[in-house]
Amino acid sequence: MAGSHLDTNMTRIGDCVYLQKPGGTGGSVPSGDQPDLILIFGWMGAKLPHLLKYSKAYDEIYPGATKILVRAPPSVFFSPEGRKRANLAPAVEALEALGYVPTADKRKQRYREPLEPLLPGKLSPRVLVHAFSNGGCWQLSILSRILQERFKGVEAEPAASAVILDSCPSNGGTKETQKAFTTAIRNPILKRIAAIVITLLLYFGWIMTKLGSTPPLEVTKKILNQPKLLPWFTKATARLYIYSKTDELMPPGDVEGHAELAKRNGLQVRLEKYDESPHVAHARTDPVRYWNAVKQLWEDALKTAH
C-alpha cells in the first residue's frame, strides 16, 4: 500500500518503490561531499530485506542522501510498456517532489502526501546510481526513458554523478535467463514449468529478432551506454562494473564486453573483478573491498565535477 511504513526508516510509496529521507549529519564522508540522491535498483525477485542491507550500508556512509529503492519483480518483465512505466511513476513523482525533475501537468498526485516535506529541491542533484543484475538494469533503463521525455526542452546542469553496475549486464543467454527467473522458486515442479515458459518466450523473442525487432535486453544495454543515461549524467559520469569470474548468471565476458563498448563511447569506466563471489554477493564476500570501491568511485565523481 502506497505510503505504508517499513520497520526501517524507508517508506513504501508504490508497488515496487521505496523512499528514505535523509537521516541527518554524520557518516564516514563529510556532508558537503555526499550525494544528494542515491537510486538503488534491485535484482530480479530480490527480497526487500536483502536490498535494505545495501540502503543501510549507504546510511552509514552517506546519511545525508535521499534514497529511492526500486525492486524488480519478475512480473514486470512480461508487462506492457504502460504498466512498466506505471510501476515507476512513484519514483518519478518523488524526484519531482524533490525538485530534481520538471513538473508535469494534468497528472494524478497519488503520492504527494508523504513527499511534501521534501520540497524544495534543485534540478541538478549529485546522483549515485546502483543497479544490480539485468533486473536492476531493466528498471533503470525504463526510468531513463521516462526522464528523457520529461526533460525535453529542459537542461539539467551537470553535477557530480556516478553509476555502479553490480553483476551486470549480460547478453541474456538461455541458461542464464532460466536461472535468473527460477532461482527464487522452491517447488521443483513449478521451477520446471517456469523454465519451459522462459524458453518459449526466448524462442519467441528470437523469432521477433529475425523479423527485425530488437531484443529488449539489447535495448537496455544500449541505453546503459548512453552518456546521458539519466538527465544529470555526462560522458564524465564515473561508472563502476563489479562482477566475478565465477558468476553463473552473469558471464564475466558479457560484463567486460559492455564495459569495453562504454570506453569506446568515451565513458569513464573502471572494473572491480572478483575471483569467486557468487551473483550479486560481492559485498557479502568482501565488504571492505566492495564499499571502498564504491567510496572511491564517488570521490572520483566529485573530482570530475570540480
Image: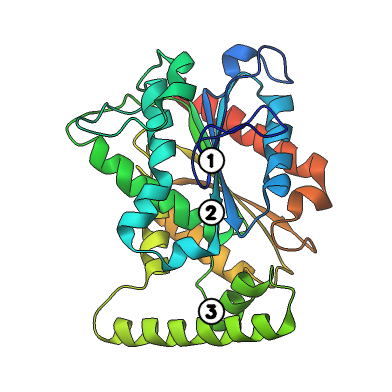
Q: Amino acid at mark 2?
A: Gly
User: How far is disc 1 from disc 2 in space, using C-alphas?
Assistant: 22 Å
Disc 3: which residue: 173
Crowd band around label 2 with a 10 angstrom C-alpha radius: few (<14), some (14–19), many (20+): many
Q: Amino acid at mark 1?
A: Met
Q: On the image, which quarter does residue 219 sit in?
A: bottom left
The answer to whether residue 46 of the structure is visible from this angle is yes
Q: Residue at x 58, y 59 (%)?
A: 133
Q: Which numbered disc covers residue 136?
A: 2
Q: Observer-nearest residue: 15 or 58?
A: 15
Q: Residue at x 37, y 37 (%)?
A: 234
Q: Observer-nearest residue: 258 or 194?
A: 194
Q: On the image, which quarter does residue 25 sit in?
A: top right
Crowd band around label 3 with a 10 angstrom C-alpha radius: few (<14), some (14–19), many (20+): few
Picture layout, residue 268 above or below residue 106: below
Element type where label 2 sits in the image: helix
Disc 1: which residue: 1
The image position of residue 285, as x and y in percent, is 82, 53
Q: Amino acid at mark 3?
A: Gly
Crowd band around label 1 with a 10 angstrom C-alpha radius: few (<14), some (14–19), many (20+): few
Q: Residue at x 69, y 86 (%)?
A: 189
